[in-house]
Amino acid sequence: MNTLFMRDPASKLREKSIEWMSQFFSLTCIGLMPLMPLLMSVLFLDSKYIKQYQYWLGKFRVHFAAIAKGPVTHYLSDVFLHYQDIPVHIQGECVQCGNCCLDKQCAFLEPIENDKFQCGIYHSRLRRYSNCNSFPLNAKDIERYQCPSYFVVNIVPVRTSR
């Protein structure tokens, strides 16, 4: 048996736990879907979520379908539990394309002008605990959302002679 492809039991358990937590979170969000506009009104102190209940309910359906495809697992493993390796350096700056916002499916994403977008909860204290606050964390993030403005920089140590 090739030992290069064997993982330790703790690693397998961690992966299974992350998978289970991700599924639990996604199912909980789906179960709470009818209450989401009310919860968001309370969390963000903004009545627009209640006043436009059907509109926001539709946006949350799309949002939760998008996060179930990987961002929850990414958050739990890479951000919350710091399980994955993070590159030394990422360069670039946001050009407001909206790609990293669940491929423009985030319920809070707002169009502003000429294919540019902004986060509707950017200044919220709760945002800092979200997956959004960590983007881009690694090359997989940049690739997943085809980010046009961030890139990983490989830093190579240089030796000088004296």
Image: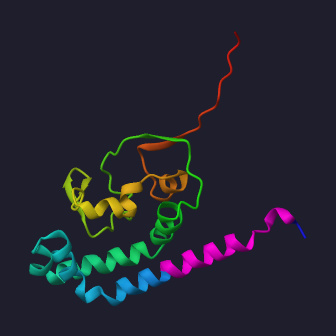
Q: In this view, does 5 lie above or below 48?
A: above
Say how many tags the image has. Answer: 0
Is 131 placed left or right of 113 in the picture? right
Q: In which quarter of the image is the N terminus?
A: bottom right
Q: Which residue is drawn at 25% across and 60% down?
A: 125
Q: Is residue 8 above or below residue 32?
A: above
Q: Where is residue 89 in the image (x, y as percent from the top left)?
A: 51, 40
| Closer to the camera in the image, 60 or 12 | 12
Q: Position of residue 49 (x, y in %)?
A: 15, 76
Which residue appears farthest toward the top when viewing the image? 162
Q: Where is residue 87 in the image (x, y as percent from the top left)?
A: 56, 46
| Closer to the camera in the image, 53 or 88 | 88
| Closer to the camera in the image, 160 or 36 | 160
Q: Which residue is drawn at 22% across and 62% down?
A: 121
Main secondary structure of the magenta stretch: helix
Q: In which quarter of the image is the C terminus?
A: top right
Q: Position of residue 31 (x, y in %)?
A: 35, 90
Which residue appears farthest toward the right when viewing the image? 1
Q: Give the range drawn in magenta.
A: 3-22
Q: How is the image coloured?
A: rainbow
Q: Which residue is drawn at 33% across and 74% down?
A: 63
Is 132 placed left or right of 74 in the picture? left
Residue 25 highlighted magenta (yes or no): no
**Residue 41: which quarter of the image?**
bottom left
Q: Which residue is drawn at 12% across and 79% down?
A: 52
Is 161 placed left or right of 143 in the picture? right
